[in-house]
Image (spheres, rainbow, N blue to C red):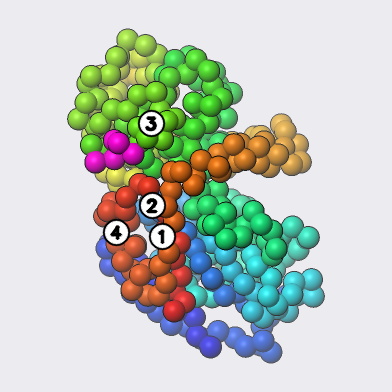
């Protein structure tokens, strides 16, 4: 049996190819290893961000690829088709981080009733969440369309949750408004939902393209929606926090110069525009800084104790998930051509914001 994988050129993301590798059979699996068939996975603009910062944040090391190429990590579901671990049965369904491939070999470790970890040496040195797999067989929260929402948005909503928590913990750095660029992105509207629903007194402003403005306005979680060419129309005399999902140096500079010292926080979160320059000039207002989610996770895990993050995040997800049927249409694609098409459309920004794509390399 062979594994088919979709890999991209690390120095030119427009270039991709399919590669085939031979898989071990049941008899030759390493001790406690699992062979997992990757059933379906979500693909969003966030996965492009994984590729852009793949070297810096070690995403490329998770799923090895030929020299010069990388396999972009994706969130999705797999079925155990062979097992050498006594506590994991063939047929089990696992939710977690997968390669864009048809199969994954997992060195199962720390197996419990709820999940397990991949202990492969090349996967260490990254945030623990990327090596964790939830055992979700028979769990309705991970079945059918609800499962698609989990794959498409739960990891992104965790980032939204952590940014919301960080801002609130710091009393929004004295800001009265929060501006989100790339307001149509899934991480942005997840954060906007949390701010709008749970942070009274904070005005939520979404920056977006003219093409996506009507969608962003329809979400109902932004107090104001402004297109990128209208940034200078924003009131600039009140303390403001900027959460940058776009990663656009020109936009960041324009916003900082417009608000000046009223920019009290400038957090770099995403790279949906992929338009950052390496050497940005010093800007007025708060110095732009990357928000690193694992730091906030470690801090809260210590302060809130075992299960504290999961409990609070679970409550937030319960308030968010019902909105998704109104906001998002799930589009499925199977096979090599579908994966390549959606990858290129996502890379080029051609995916409508009200779509979420669930893909599979299996025919």
Residues marked 3 and 1 touching at CB (< 8 Å): no
Report the side of 90 relative to 55 (left or right).
right
Q: Which residue is mark 3?
A: 180
Q: Quadrant of residue 244?
A: top left
Mark nearer the N terminus (4 vs 1)? 1
Q: Upstream in the sequence, badge 4 or badge 2? A: 4
Q: Earlier in the sequence, mark 3 or mark 4?
A: 3
| Residue 94 shows in this picture | yes
Residue 130 magenta-drawn?
Answer: no
Q: Give the mark nearest the N terminus, 1 or 2.
A: 1
**Span of residues in magenta:** 211-215
Residue located beneath label 4 in the image: 345
Q: Is residue 262 above or below residue 350?
A: above
Residue drawn at (67%, 86%) of the image: 26
In terms of depth relative to the viewer, which is nearer, 131 or 343? 343
> Label 4, label 1: how many angstroms apart (C-alpha)?
13 Å
Residue at image position (57%, 60%) is 144
């Amino acid at each position: 049996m062979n594994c088919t994988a979709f890999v991209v050129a690390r120095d030119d993301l427009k270039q991709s190819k399919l590669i085939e590798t031979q898989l071990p059979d049941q008899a030759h699996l390493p001790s406690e290893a699992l062979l997992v068939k990757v059933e379906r996975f979500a693909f969003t603009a966030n996965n492009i961000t994984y590729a852009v910062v793949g070297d810096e944040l070690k995403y490329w090391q998770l799923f090895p690829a030929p020299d010069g190429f990388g396999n972009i990590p994706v969130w999705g579901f797999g079925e155990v088709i062979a097992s050498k671990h006594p506590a994991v049965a063939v047929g089990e369904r696992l939710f977690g981080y997968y390669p864009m491939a048809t199969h994954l070999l997992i060195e199962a470790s720390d197996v419990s009733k709820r999940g397990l970890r991949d202990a492969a040496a090349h996967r260490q040195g990254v945030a623990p969440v990327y090596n964790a797999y939830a055992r979700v067989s028979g769990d309705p929260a991970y079945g059918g369309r609800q499962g698609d929402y989990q794959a498409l948005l739960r990891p992104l909503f965790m980032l939204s949750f952590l940014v919301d928590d960080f801002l609130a913990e710091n009393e929004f750095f004295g800001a009265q408004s929060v501006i989100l660029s790339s307001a149509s992105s899934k991480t942005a509207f997840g954060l906007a939902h949390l701010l709008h629903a749970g942070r009274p007194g904070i005005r939520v402003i979404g920056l977006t393209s003219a093409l996506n403005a009507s969608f962003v306005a329809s979400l109902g979680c932004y107090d104001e929606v402004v297109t990128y060419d209208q940034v200078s129309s924003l009131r600039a005399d009140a303390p403001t926090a900027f959460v940058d999902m776009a990663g656009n140096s020109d936009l960041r500079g324009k916003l900082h110069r417009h608000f000046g010292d009223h920019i009290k926080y400038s957090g770099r979160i995403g790279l949906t525009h992929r338009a950052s320059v390496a050497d940005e000039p010093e800007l007025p207002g708060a110095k732009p800084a990357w928000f690193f989610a694992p730091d906030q996770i470690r801090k809260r895990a210590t302060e809130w104790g075992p299960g504290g993050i999961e409990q609070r995040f679970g409550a937030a997800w319960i308030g968010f998930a019902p909105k998704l049927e109104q906001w998002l249409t799930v589009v499925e694609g199977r096979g090599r051509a579908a994966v390549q098409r959606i990858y290129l459309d996502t890379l080029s920004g051609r995916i409508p914001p009200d779509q979420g794509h669930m893909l599979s390399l299996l025919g």
